[in-house]
Image (cartoon, rainbow, N blue to C red):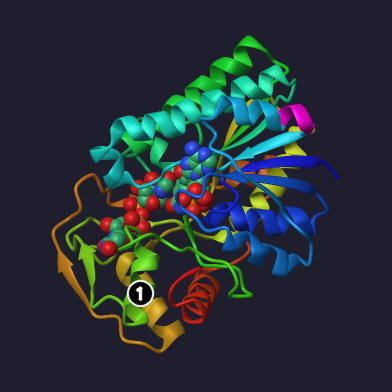
Amino acid sequence: MSKILVTGGAGYIGSHTCVELIDAGHELLVIDNLSNSSIESLSRVEQITGKPVTFEQIDIRDARALNQLFDSHTFDAVIHFAGLKAVGESCELPLEYYHNNVSGTLNLCLTMKAHNCRNLVFSSSATVYGDPASLPIAENFPLSATNPYGRSKLIIEEMLGDLHRADSAWNILLLRYFNPAGAHPSGLIGEDPNGVPNNLLPYISQVAIGKLEQLRVFGGDYDTLDGTGVRDYIHVVDLAKGHLKALQKLQQQPGCKAYNLGVGNGYSVLQMVQAYANASGKKIPYQIVDRRPGDIASCYADASLAAQELGWSAELGLDEMVRDGWNWQQKNPDGFG
Ligand code: NAD
Ligand code: WQD
């Protein structure tokens, strides 16, 4: 057992990871500024696990609060989810994204360094591969960014690489998530987007439940099996379990290393629509419209490095993702309320 600080732990991926960490016997402290989440998610984590969750409402940009926290607790490692993640919004508010994601992470690392905590798991993203030259995408592919959100992840990855080069006592795992989907099978926690969802599966869910009229499929003329975009959707519970493996890996003092967390194959938008319609028994009306600027045709992981070096691979498939996503949507039509 070890004591883990989870930043952004009230959010979608963070809350699912808290469940797995608690079930595995870790002691947690969660911080979150609740800018994109509800404290209710952590009550649900308590319900699922039957264990209390220690929470403090802290913004990672608040150096004083972070220092006070580290003064009163000794953490073996930090799992760092806190960040803003909407690509479109990042184009409108680049400074806010760099401030939140880059300055926030810088602040966190300075505090960790000052308190001699040098084990970090960072939520990166497949977006750091930009428009890949070939598929599947391996960790050694060239990195690039096409929007401020992606660039914030890239800058952080580079900053963390520099940190390890300067002081090899740091152990840092950069987990590059592909497209997280689904929800906890209990239906108690899941994705609760603010306003109209940007991402495909929350959007489809809201069409299925009747909150949105129809899905706009962004582009029907890509060079893919049916012309619509292909992505590597990964069940959020599988993703959460990847963090347990990452914590184990940190004990081997790996230095700074990046791992893809994806399934290793992709589904098209229309395949996702069909799967969701089958799981929900609902019709998902859709219309094919223009491509969304910045989108790429296909994106899926070479997931073999995580399998070899973390002992992790996805166990759940598309059926479980849509089944659990629909279960969460039905039980919580207004999210956490
Ligand atoms: P989320 O918005 O549900 O969770 C992020 C949490 O961080 C939220 O609870 C939010 O309130 C909190 N937060 C944001 N800024 C903060 C700050 N300054 N101080 C403290 N807390 C703050 O998002 P998620 O989907 O759970 O994503 C978690 C992480 O994974 C993010 O870093 C995101 O960029 C990354 N990621 C997400 C996806 C995805 O598609 N969901 C894909 C790849 C990477
Ligand atoms: C998936 C597919 C769309 C909505 C984004 C970020 C990425 C990462 C994951 C954080 C694409 C199509 C979508 C809709 C549609 N996040 N689509 N109609 O763009 O692969 O990745 O989230 O790191 O950085 O860019 O995910 O869910 O938005 O789109 O047709 O209303 O669904 O064109 O092919 P994306 P997504």
162 lies above or below 194:
above
Most distant residue in the right direction: 1
Residue 251 x %, y %: 79, 33
Determine if the magenta segment contains residue 73.
Answer: yes
Most distant residue in the bottom direction: 281
Check disc 1: other Cα within 10 Å, few if <14, some if 14-19, many if 20+: many
Dominant SS type (magenta): helix
Residue 212 x %, y %: 27, 75
Quadrant in the picture for the N terminus: top right
Q: Is residue 142 visible?
A: no
170 lies above or below 308:
above
Span colored in magenta: 70-74
Residue drawn at x 34%, y 72% is 204
Residue drawn at x 69%, y 17% is 114
192 lies above or below 140:
below
Give the labeled residue for mark 1: 206
Residue 320 x %, y %: 55, 73
